[in-house]
Amino acid sequence: MKSILFPFEISKDNWKRYLYTQELAQRMNAEIVYYTTVAPDQSTSDYDEIYLHLLELNGIYRTGYCKWDSPKLEVETVIEVGEFWNCLSTFLTRHAFDQVVIS
């Protein structure tokens, strides 16, 4: 199966990129890997914020663009501990993706 990496930071406005990734995954019949990081000293509530951010993005997509009718996509969420760009760089050396959607 093809795969698309969607790296994101919750502090960024990334809903347009999320919408694009959803549409691309449908056209490619691809799995989406949502990737982000937390700082080493973060609490469990910070993980909650990540999942709430993804839920909000999915809500924007479902209510405004696909009307809850889109095909079910395979998704995976990866959360690593460390600085975002350093961890992402290392992650990309360990995993291959057909597409990486960055802004």
Image: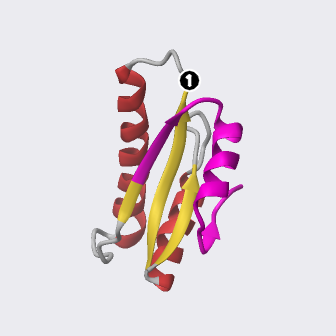
- The quarter in which the C terminus is drawn is bottom right
* The magenta stretch spans residue 10: no
- Please state the horizontal and vertical placement of residue 28, each as a whole percent of the image: 50, 83
Q: Is residue 84 magenta?
A: yes
Say which of 3 and 22 sits in front: 3
Residue 38 spot, x, y in % from top left:
52, 29
At 56% from the left edge and 23% from the top edge, which residue is drawn? 39
Residue 101 occupies quadrant: bottom right
* Drawn side of residue 70 relative to residue 23, left or right: left
Relative to residue 58, is residue 101 drawn left or right? right
- Three-letter residue code for mark 1: Ala
Q: Which range is magenta?
A: 77-103
| SS class, disc 1 | loop
The answer to whether residue 27 is visible is yes
Q: Quadrant of residue 92?
A: bottom right
Please indicate whether residue 44 sits to the left or right of residue 30 in the image.
Answer: left
Q: Is residue 88 left or right of residue 72?
A: right
Q: Which residue is mark 1?
A: 39
> Is residue 48 shown above or below 68?
above
- Which residue occupies 29% across, 72% down? 72
72 or 33, nearer to the observer = 33
Residue 16 seen: no
The answer to whether residue 100 is above or below residue 10 is below
Q: How is the image coloured?
A: secondary structure
Q: Residue 93: where, in percent of width, then height?
A: 67, 56
Query: Is residue 51 shown above or below 32?
Result: above
How many numbered dots are placed on residues in this image? 1
Extreme-front residue of the structure: 94
Q: Quadrant of the N terminus?
A: bottom left
Residue appearing at x 56%, y 61% in the figure: 5
